[in-house]
Image (tube, helix red, strand yellow):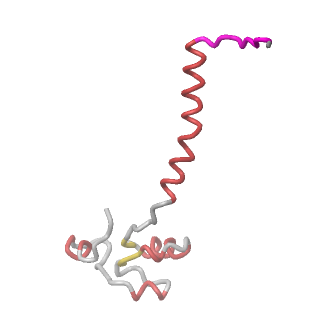
Amino acid sequence: MTMVSFPRLSPLTLALAIVLSLLLGVPQARAEKAAAFADTSKIIAIGGSITEIVYALGEQGHLVARDSTSRYPEAALKLPDVGYMRQLSPEGVLSVNPSG
């Protein structure tokens, strides 16, 4: 029986190989963890243009309220009105319980 000899790795090379293998596995684990949680953010659209942008991006499901300048699209009118954008009261905004 013949003995095969492999070159001996230095401790530094071995340590770098271990660290590299660990780092390559981390992004996949983070991606799987992030995909497991649904986005439950609740937002208020302050300003007509902001409301239109939210609807254009298809994220209207996250809207819980709007300000009085948000008149378009018509579906936005069904949301609670928290007041005029330049005179918002904290009570009106907090009453719809937006996420932080």
Residue nearer the viewer, 85 or 66:
66
The spot of residue 13 in percent (x, y) is 60, 16
Please name the residue shown 54% across and 27% down the image. 19
The spot of residue 62 in percent (x, y) is 43, 73
Q: Which part of the image, by quadrant, shows the N terminus?
A: top right
Residue nearer the viewer, 45 or 41:
41
- The answer to whether 77 is drawn above or below residue 90 in the figure is below
The spot of residue 51 in percent (x, y) is 45, 75
- The answer to whether 47 is drawn above or below residue 22 in the figure is below
User: Within the magenta stretch, is there residue 7?
Assistant: yes
Please name the residue shown 70% across and 11% down the image. 7
Residue nearer the viewer, 10 or 82:
10
Please name the residue shown 57% across and 22% down the image. 16
Q: Which residues are magenta?
A: 2-10
Q: Quadrant of residue 39?
A: bottom left
Looking at the image, the residue that sits furthest to the front is 1
Q: Is residue 10 left or right of residue 89?
A: right
Count of numbered labels shown in the rendering: 0
Which SS does the magenta portion mostly show?
loop
Q: Is residue 35 left or right of residue 2?
A: left
- The answer to whether 61 is drawn above or below residue 7 in the figure is below
Q: Which part of the image, by quadrant, shows the C terminus?
A: bottom left
Looking at the image, the residue that sits furthest to the right is 2
